[in-house]
Amino acid sequence: MNNYLLVINAGSSSIKFAVYQKDASSNQLVVVVTGQIEGIGNQPNFTVMNPNDVVLVERKLSVDEVHDHTSSITSIRAWLRDYFADVTLLAVGHRVVHGGQYYSAPVLIDAKVLNDLEALVPLAPLHQPHNLAAIRAFQEIMPNLPQVACFDTAFHRTQPDVAQRFALPRRYFDEGVRHYGFHGLSYEYIVSILPTLDPSITSARIIVAHLGNGASLCALQNGRSIATTMGFTPLDGLVMGTRCGHIDPGVLLYLMDHYGMDARAMEQLLYHQSGLLGVSGISSDMRTLLSSNDPCAWEAIELFVYSIGREIGSLTSALGGLDALVFTGGIGEHSAVIRAKICQQTAWLGLELDQSANETEVKQISTLNSKVSAWVLATDENLMIAQHTLKQVT
């Protein structure tokens, strides 16, 4: 492939990107460079690295130069044009958090798609606007470039109707108030590599734990999502870095009545001031909490683990049993302590942890006699987006 694909993951103050090309020998997509502009509109910083973590670019940018998503995309595009002078940008794949009830697969972006995704902004107000801003930026500077939207919600559209419903009047479900689930691109990637572990595992009853600053679990049956912990928004389910996870709606009514909190104040509390940060009063970073002697740090850790253990029980019920547990995400891949604690919570299911394997970089961390196998797998959402993008434009 004498060209390259660009993957974009846009946030409120940062744009992360990755460039993929086909390897001549394997004919597989491989990452060539990764980078980001962070601090957009404040103190923008531009970094680019090769696959061996060698820094190719690290420089401060002026606010005049980079002040919004369009100017950020322009700067990224200018660097790519210089670095890949002899090849062509084939297409851009975007991570889009919300695809709603109708977009169950990646799609080429046109005016109708963009309008549909704009209508979903109220369902993901902290993510969707920034995803769409990056798409519009490319439309402005490269109007003929194919762009593909890849949705975090799409993988979960296979769930049965009963798993998607809230017990609210039917009209709300019909207008889109339902369990959507997120981290779908991560789960889809994990499903794609499961056969490399053990061919029989693809038909097994599996729970994948995507644990990071954002965290969720997904129950898989025959490689399809049948239930997940996140719901209408990425706020529900597990305790997360700064998000509260599952909460009694009555608590929200209490806060509104007794503290006069409006929707924006509630949003700030639930998304940015809760979770590990709120309980510990120290940090949202699991590494910081694990290294702390403060009892509040360990209360936050224990609550995080408890919420995961409890939800594993719920998803095991939905599956009718459990054959395998897969850890992924920043915490899931790198914290042996947290994995061990979660495996202790699931020992009742017949999971036996191999302590030595858990502390080394191996994929299977359960004993050979364990009734439930346990695995550690690195996820790759960017590669999933690149693969989807290539299929859409070739």
Image: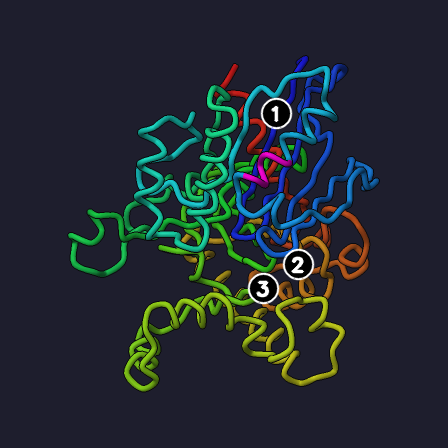
Q: What element carries label 1?
A: strand
Residue 373 visible to an observer of this rendering: no
- Label 2 to label 3: alpha-carbon separation: 18 Å
- Label 2 to label 1: alpha-carbon separation: 29 Å
Q: Which amino acid does the dot numbered 1 rest on?
A: Leu
Residue 369 rendering spot, x and y as whole percentages: 70, 53
Q: Residues within 10 Å of mark 3 (few under 14, many from 20)?
A: many
User: In the rendered structure, which segment of residues is drawn in magenta?
Assistant: 71-75
Residue 143 rendering spot, x and y as whole percentages: 47, 23
Q: Residues within 10 Å of mark 1 (few under 14, many from 20)?
A: many
Of badges 3 and 1, the one in the foreground is 1
- Is residue 73 on the magenta stretch? yes
Disc number at residue 5?
Answer: 1
Quadrant for the N terminus, please: top right
Residue 367 rendering spot, x and y as whole percentages: 72, 54
Q: Which amino acid does the dot numbered 2 rest on?
A: Ile
Q: Do the CB atoms of the residues marked 2 and 3 lie less than 8 Å apart?
A: no
For the rendered model, the colour scheme is rainbow
User: Which badge, 2 or 3, is on the more N-terminal residue?
Assistant: 2
Q: Is residue 35 above or below residue 127?
A: above
Q: Name the residue under label 2.
A: 331
Q: Which amino acid does the dot numbered 3 rest on?
A: Thr
Is 388 left, or right, of 170 in this rendering?
right
Q: Mark 3 points at which residue?
A: 346
The residue sitting at 69% across, 53% down in the picture is: 333
